[in-house]
Amino acid sequence: MILEEIKKIIPKERMHINEPMSKHTSFKIGGNAKILVNIISVFELQKILKILKEEKIRIIIIGNGSNILVSDKGIDGIVLKIEIKKFEIQKIDSKYRITLGAGCKLGEISYKLADKNISGFEFASGIPGTIGGAIRMNAGAYGSEMKDIVNSITYIDRNGQISKINNKEAKFEYRNSIFSKKDYIIIETEIELESGKKEEIIEKIKEYQKNRIEKQPIEYPSAGSVFKRGDGFITAKLIDECGLKGYQIGDAQISEKHAGFIINKGNAKAKDVEDLIKYIKKQVLEKFGVEIETEIEIIH
């Protein structure tokens, strides 16, 4: 019944039954989702939420799948993959206000902005996610975070109600925001940036990319940095000092290039990654007496 109702809203090419989540996560890991739907408009999202409201069906929201680990059993429910694209620029005095759909990819945004001589987004250019996911976890790099550039965020709740909040109301913290705690779905954001020179912006983006290639194992599937930064310590440094670089369970390995990354060497299972995370936490606690916290979201 639910399936038939969704089919009235979503064309069949954007609706997938028993879809392998390994195709939708940067880890290339995960069992099947019962139903996965690619959402490209707020209208579609509202319609689907209305259909699902009265049914006790689990809803999982994903973007680019770059900060998640999906269990080997998959997802018993409906996955809504947010691909709402919007890119609008408004110049106000010397500033630029840019409205972005939650499904816009950070790397693509950075080059579009560079092309318009707009600076301030370079830090996010190498983060392999969407703007929605980046805001949800207050993503950051090179000393900047999303909270530094966000003006407002528009979201929809599970009842289909659309609301807008400002930067302060988003309660941004380190790798956290109100969206990590509430059942809200980000649909768009407005950021504020400044004028720059295209050549200098591109140069900075390339410098960050070079740095990423040199220091991170981007040649392997991963979910980025697995653990949060500690209070007064660098987690990856502690893992390294435990002598864990290269340690492997199944096809999941602690990167030899960066101890904060777990990589999929080919056919890693979610259980391999979870077991490795537990092992790392245990070793760091035993050696240094500190508990480290995961940054990636594990979906069972």
Image (tube, rainbow, N blue to C red):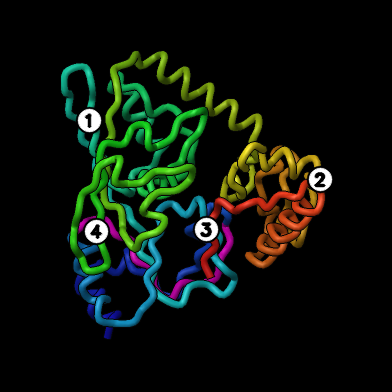
Do the residues bearing badges 2 and 3 touch, measured as CB atoms within 8 Å?
no
- In this rendering, the answer to whether 87 lies above or below 247 is above
Q: Nearer the viewer, mark 2 or mark 1?
A: 2
Q: Which image quadrant: the N terminus?
A: bottom left
Do the residues bearing badges 4 and 3 touch, measured as CB atoms within 8 Å?
no
Which picture quadrant has residue 214?
A: top right
* Residues packed near mark 1 inside 10 Å, few (<14), some (14 to 19) or many (20 plus): some
Query: Which residue is at 43% across, 51% downward?
Result: 64
How far is mark 4 from mark 1, CA to CA? 22 Å
How far is mark 2 from mark 1, CA to CA? 46 Å
**Residue wearing tag 4:** 156
Q: Amino acid at mark 2?
A: Cys
**Relative depth, front residue between 23 and 253:** 253
Q: Amino acid at mark 1?
A: Arg
Does the stretch in magenta take in 220?
no
Q: Earlier in the sequence, mark 2 or mark 3?
A: 2
Which picture quadrant has residue 58?
A: bottom left
Q: Amino acid at mark 4?
A: Ile
Disc sitting over residue 242 in the figure: 2
